[in-house]
Amino acid sequence: MLWIAQASIFMAFAGLTSGFLVSKGSLQDKGLWMEFALPSEFLVSTFLIGVSSLALIVSARALKTDNQSMFKGGIIAAFFLGIGFIVFQLLGWQDLINRGIFFTGEGSNVSGSWIYAITFFHLLHLAGGIIAIVVTMIKALKDLYSVDNKLGFELTSIFWHFLGVVWLYLYLFLIFVR
């Protein structure tokens, strides 16, 4: 079920990026597409989500050797790095606002609105990932995972890595297609 959900989530993001391309193509020809640099905070958030995936990889390896303290530490690190990702996304939005790039309303532009929509949609899915990590972290702290009982951790990790790959796709798309 997780793989089916991830496939549909990815298709939703493919639809968003496709809509971005169509909008850009039709508005750029009319001189209505605004070009601007992405916030540097988005690069920091990309780094943070990548490191959070590495923390879960370390956790998985620690669980295989029954190193519970390293296992728990990796999950806790992934949680805080995920929170850092969210913080830097919000700081990126603040940077856009400070530069006069708004989601909607007077002074907004379609190109800016697409950035907000795409990143917000990813943040919604990341909130689900954070909830999964919190549940996994609580179970880990209660010593409910072991070499023989790790399915919940594995499912959370798969989803978290998926969110990281989706963000990397979105970030590279926005860097190179803009």
Image (spheres, rainbow, N blue to C red):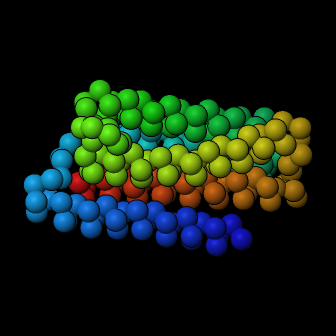
Nearer to me, 32 or 58: 32
Count of number-bearing discs: 0
**Residue shown at 14% from the left, 59% from the top:** 28
Nearer to me, 178 or 22: 22
**Residue shown at 34% from the left, 42% from the top:** 104
**Horizontal arrangement in the rendering, residue 25 relative to residue 158 (left or right):** left
The quadrant of the picture occupied by the N terminus is bottom right
**Residue shown at 22% from the left, 60% from the top:** 24
**Horizontal arrangement in the rendering, residue 101 relative to residue 54 (left or right):** left
The quadrant of the picture occupied by the C terminus is bottom left
Residue 36 position (above or below residue 155): above
**Residue shown at 10% from the left, 60% from the top:** 30
Residue 139 position (above or below residue 15): above
**Horizontal arrangement in the rendering, residue 143 relative to residue 174 (left or right):** right
Q: Position of residue 87 (x, y in %)?
A: 50, 31
Residue 131's quadrant in the figure? top right
On the question of residue 74 being in view, the answer is: no
Q: Position of residue 38 (x, y in %)?
A: 28, 41
Nearer to me, 97 or 163: 97
